[in-house]
Image (spheres, rainbow, N blue to C red):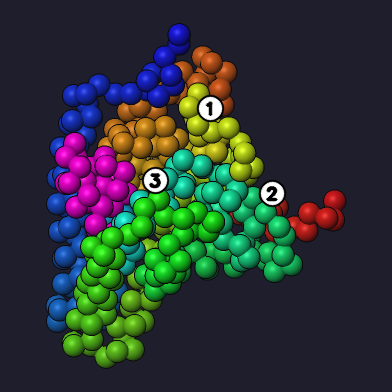
């Protein structure tokens, strides 16, 4: 029997271990960047424009934490030690979103059912946006290719103040009940995470700065982080070269790899000088196909698996989709939003 595509692209154990060690140094660097920029923004006696620079550095640190530490940790890819990966995953709570609920929404619903309508909550933004042809159309969605870019920025704020609490109260995401009833300890940790985020991001700065300034900076930083994170995930799946599926689409067992390859698109940064920075900021998710085939691989070895996977796909006549630049990816998402925003009853 032919080896699976995932098997063909898999780096050696030594390469994976080396990747994990680099991951830990990278985390220390991101933590330093986060603490340094927060100190500059809140405590340092500096001019306004330098505070703006510190806020921008904090945006970069928060996005890098989400992509390089939180996402990897919650997939159990941060360390071979499950507990250490779980601790890395808690960085999500520091950013305001529950890691406990993220693991259900992202690992199970999104990864297990990528682009499947009614299961993948990343493509469920109804009624504000219609992101798949199987979803019902509403007149307001005619303008979704304009306003969704603005709404994407509120992603993290919405996690912090609304959706996590709603999920906890209803014990389900969309139509999907949480696999296990959250224990008192899980609920306490979710609430503790929210309290810690509120304390460092709003309460402490308010002791030193006017409340309106704190809220303005908080909203600007939160919007920027949400905008970048939403784009990292949407440009890989919610584009006009990806496919969308009905709830009964075969996607498990032998169908898993082909399903993921049809629903996921890689991105290559078109400016070579920017490539290392973009790759780092995206937490390796410019290689989203490789991540979807092997979510437990540390993200910094995905680029090493890509040439093998691409060659294996070419040999077997399977399409391997790549946006050749970030602009091409943005255009593809824009086109998809505009297409889905058109009234389907008008030919
Ligand atoms: Zn993932």
Residue 324 is left or right of residue 275, and the answer is right
**Residue hosting label 2:** 133
As drawn, the label of residue 317 is none
Give 203 or 35, whichever is nearer the viewer.
Answer: 203
Q: Tell me which label, 2 or 3, sits earlier in the chain.
A: 3
Point out residue 33 in the picture as x, y percentages from the top left corner. Answer: 19, 60
Dot 3 beta carbon under 8 Å from ligand 1: yes
Q: Quadrant of residue 92?
A: bottom left
Badge 2: few (under 14), some or many (20 or more) residues near its Cα, within 10 Å?
some
Instruction: Give how far apart the Cα atoms at labels 1 and 2 are.
Output: 22 Å
Is residue 284 placed above or below 213 in the rendered structure? above
Point out residue 142 in the picture as x, y percentages from the top left corner. Answer: 71, 64
Q: Residue at x 18, y 73 (%)?
A: 40
As drawn, the label of residue 107 is 3
User: Are the residues at dot 2 and dot 3 in contact (C-beta closer than 8 Å)?
Assistant: no
Foreground: disc 1 or disc 2:
1
Is residue 312 placed above or below 261 in the rendered structure? above
Q: Residue at x 61, y 43 (%)?
A: 247
Q: Disc 2 on helix, strand or loop?
A: loop
Q: Residue at x 83, y 55 (%)?
A: 345
Give 297 or 37, whichever is nearer the viewer.
Answer: 297
Q: Which residue is situated farthest in the right direction here? A: 347
**Residue hosting label 1:** 255
Q: Is residue 89 magenta?
A: yes
Residue 129 shows in the view: yes
User: Are the residues at dot 1 and dot 2 in contact (C-beta closer than 8 Å)?
Assistant: no
Q: Is residue 246 magenta?
A: no
Q: Disc 3 on helix, strand or loop?
A: helix
Q: In the rendered structure, which segment of residues is drawn in magenta?
A: 70-95
């Amino acid at each position: 029997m032919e080896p699976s595509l995932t098997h063909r692209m898999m780096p050696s154990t030594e390469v994976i271990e080396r990747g994990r060690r680099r991951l830990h140094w990278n985390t220390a660097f991101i933590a330093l960047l986060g603490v340094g920029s927060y100190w500059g923004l809140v405590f340092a006696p500096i001019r306004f424009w330098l505070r703006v620079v510190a806020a921008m550095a904090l945006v970069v640190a928060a996005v890098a934490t989400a992509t390089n530490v939180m996402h990897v940790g919650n997939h159990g890819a941060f360390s071979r030690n499950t507990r250490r990966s779980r601790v890395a995953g808690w960085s999500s709570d520091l950013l305001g979103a529950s890691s406990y609920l993220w693991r259900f929404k992202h690992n199970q619903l999104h990864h297990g059912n990528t682009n499947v309508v009614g299961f993948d909550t990343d493509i469920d933004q109804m009624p504000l946006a219609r992101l798949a042809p199987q979803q019902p159309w509403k007149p307001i969605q005619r303008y979704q290719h304009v306003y969704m870019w603005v709404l994407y920025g509120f992603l993290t704020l919405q996690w912090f103040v609304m959706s996590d609490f709603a999920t906890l109260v209803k014990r389900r995401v969309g139509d999907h009940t949480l696999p296990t009833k959250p224990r008192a300890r899980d609920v306490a940790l979710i609430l503790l995470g929210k309290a810690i985020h509120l304390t460092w991001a709003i309460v402490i700065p308010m002791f030193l700065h006017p409340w309106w300034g704190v809220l303005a900076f908080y909203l600007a930083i939160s919007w920027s982080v949400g905008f970048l994170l939403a784009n990292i995930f949407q440009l890989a799946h919610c584009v006009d070269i990806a496919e969308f599926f009905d709830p009964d689409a075969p996607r498990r067992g032998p169908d898993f790899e082909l399903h993921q390859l049809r629903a996921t698109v890689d991105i290559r940064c078109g400016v070579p000088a920017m490539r290392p920075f973009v790759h780092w900021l995206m937490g390796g998710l410019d290689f989203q196909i490789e991540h979807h085939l092997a979510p437990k691989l540390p993200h910094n070895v995905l680029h090493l698996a890509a040439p093998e996977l691409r060659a294996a796909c070419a040999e077997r006549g399977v399409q391997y989709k790549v946006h050749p630049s970030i602009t091409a990816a943005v255009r593809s998402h824009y086109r998809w939003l505009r297409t889905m925003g058109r009234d389907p009853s008008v030919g």
